[in-house]
Amino acid sequence: MDVIMEALPALSDAWALILQPVVLGYLVLGVVMGLCIGVFPGLGGIAGLSLLLPFMFGMDPILGLALMVGMVAVVPTSDTFASVLMGIPGSSASQATVLDGFPMAKKGKAARALSAAFASSLFGGLVGATFLTGFILIARPIVLEFRTPELLMITIFGLSMVGILAGRVAIKGLVAAGLGMLIGTIGEGASSGDLRMSSYDFPYLTDGLKLVIVGLGIFAIPEIISLLRRDRAISSEPQLGGGWLDGVRDWFANIWLSVRCSIIGVVVGVIPGLGGSVVDWIAYGHAVQTTPDKSNFGKGEVRGVIGPESSNNAKEGGGLVPTLLFGIPGSGSMAIFIGAIALLGSGQIEVGPAMLQNNLDITYSIVWLLALANVVGTVICIAASGGIAKLTTIRFVLLAPFLFMIISFAAFQSGQNLMDLVALFGIGLLGILMRRFDWSRPAFLIGFVLSTPAENYANQAVQIASSRFRKGFGDGLDYIFSPIVIVLLIITVISVVLGLRQAKNIMAEGDVQSGSKRAPFLFLIAVTGYIAYAFYDAASIPSFSRDRVFPMFVAGVCLVGCVALIIRMMLKPETDTIFADREREGDDADSTYGLWPTLAWFAGLLVLTSLLGFILALALFLFTFMKLRAGLSTALAAAYTAAGIAFMCFMAWLLNRDFPPGLLQEYTDLPWPLG
């Protein structure tokens, strides 16, 4: 009762914060932006939040949170459009929805499938927000007892889950997470300031890679390139059919399935690292298991839509539990969310126990913004369905250059350096290859985000434990093995054991077919080479510096995993899942255009920007792309180009941002926006 009475003022303050007209306006804006992002297959909340990230600097905390939560909440709802209307997973959280949603659309029941999905999504989102409210009340006193060893242990738990449950080949998931951690350690070390994988002769890397660049490069660019290569409209069936009320009735008739799957979503969301790539398959499996007549699944069974859609919205509420309470991202989008919170205001908000201690009103504001965003998002999705269905019939070649334009502009805002675009291209290429060879990109991103807290907690725990052991052996053991640490250790071991059993059934990057041995083996050798050099680089740091310990340990574990993968590749036939390659079979293999010619367009924009500056390069890029690649007339290409330039200038003026300069700007004084 005391806990509830203590939290009541914070609950009241939270409602006072979010019921301001300007806050609700930002929430609706975030919902609309999330709707726009979620409609395009493969982008999802990670790409959307990455686009918002550079604009969070110094923004009023409650306004920034309303914008981000609005986007996070609606993406799992709006990605249903792609799954049902196009048969393409809108994101990793909507893969299972395709199995029955798309067959329903082909039968003329698209509206019924969408309305059942939206009702389920709304219900799941509200269940997630309700759970989060109660959990914070109960868990707050316990969380405030967390010290460095407990935080380190829960970080290890998150990393172990994301590594083991990140794909059909468990070791690949572990190495992907480790690779993300190693890239996260690039730059000056936190303890002694020693440089890792960087040099003062090349100062860009001394500050490390920015989260916005890694998020956009690893997720958005690979999906855009993949869609662009197919050279067709996203969907050829804009008709929704009737049956909006039928879908709601279907949901109500199966409400207990929706309840159970919402609980599954919350529980899976709480576990760091699982997130959307797992939850919809678990919920879909539960829907199949609890249905007496299983013959309709895969052919248009509405329960196959209701189950996954209930769970993937509820997981956002569950995912906020480790995110807000421990600072451990429950998914890739939560990883971006953590980085964005640190940028708000004057940087006074810090996720984890400190947030519950100092910003409980902000914590509850996030919870109720999540609930409101689900309601607003569902209403907008239903209202906009007809127009969105028609939008998906536009050739993607007409949309891709504008997405490249926005991504490049967003990446540049992270550091105001032309090298930001080079880094974006490099990480984007890595993301393309990871997607092609079935290496888990969520594992990589969460490893990148957790690298800094994991290293800091490890260094602090070792330092404090050493001091305690000098006082007495018992004091040291009591500090390291507290009851909470022991419980987390047991849970971690159990999770790893169960995860190893289930890993073969979890497809982090979808159902990727096996290919030949050569390409997957060469990629593995390249990854191994980078990890080996990172180990050598860290070992070169003086032995008295703690900045060498963490990257050496991570690289050492990853090298063991790489050796195991190499041995397996040498012994297994090319039909083994370890040789997964999208270029051998599936949409990528059947694409009209090759990977490298398509990627060359983006590389061309980068080269032109370095020479002419962003606006001049963009004008030349847009006109050439629309004329040669899209096949438009000169007049239409010029109109598209003018519209793109006008949009970017408006965005830059509105947000008071600059454009990347080139060599031309160093020698010539040009007016804005050219200079």
Image (cartoon, rainbow, N blue to C red):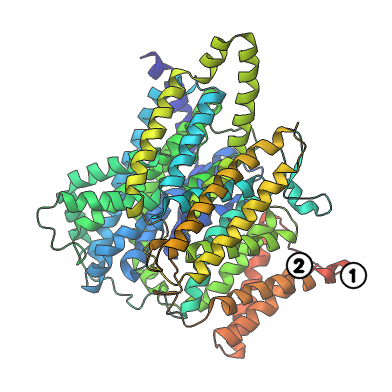
Callout 2 amino acid: Pro
Q: In this view, does 566 lie to the left or right of 187?
A: left
Q: Where is residue 23 in the image (x, y as percent from the top left)?
A: 51, 43
Q: Which residue is drawn at 74% across and 51% down?
A: 205
- Whether residue 30 is visible, yes or no, is no
Residue 637: quarter of image? bottom right
572 versus 233 height, above or below? above
| Tally of numbered tags | 2
User: Crowding at label 2, few (<14), some or many (≥20) Cα neighbours within 10 Å?
Assistant: some
Name of the residue lying farthest toward the left: 292
The kind of secondary structure element at disc 1 is helix
Residue 288: quarter of image? bottom left
The kind of secondary structure element at disc 2 is loop
User: Crowding at label 1, few (<14), some or many (≥20) Cα neighbours within 10 Å?
Assistant: few
Which quadrant is home to the C terminus? bottom right
Per the image, the residue denoted by label 2 is 673
Residue 667 disc label: 1
Which quadrant is home to the N terminus? top left
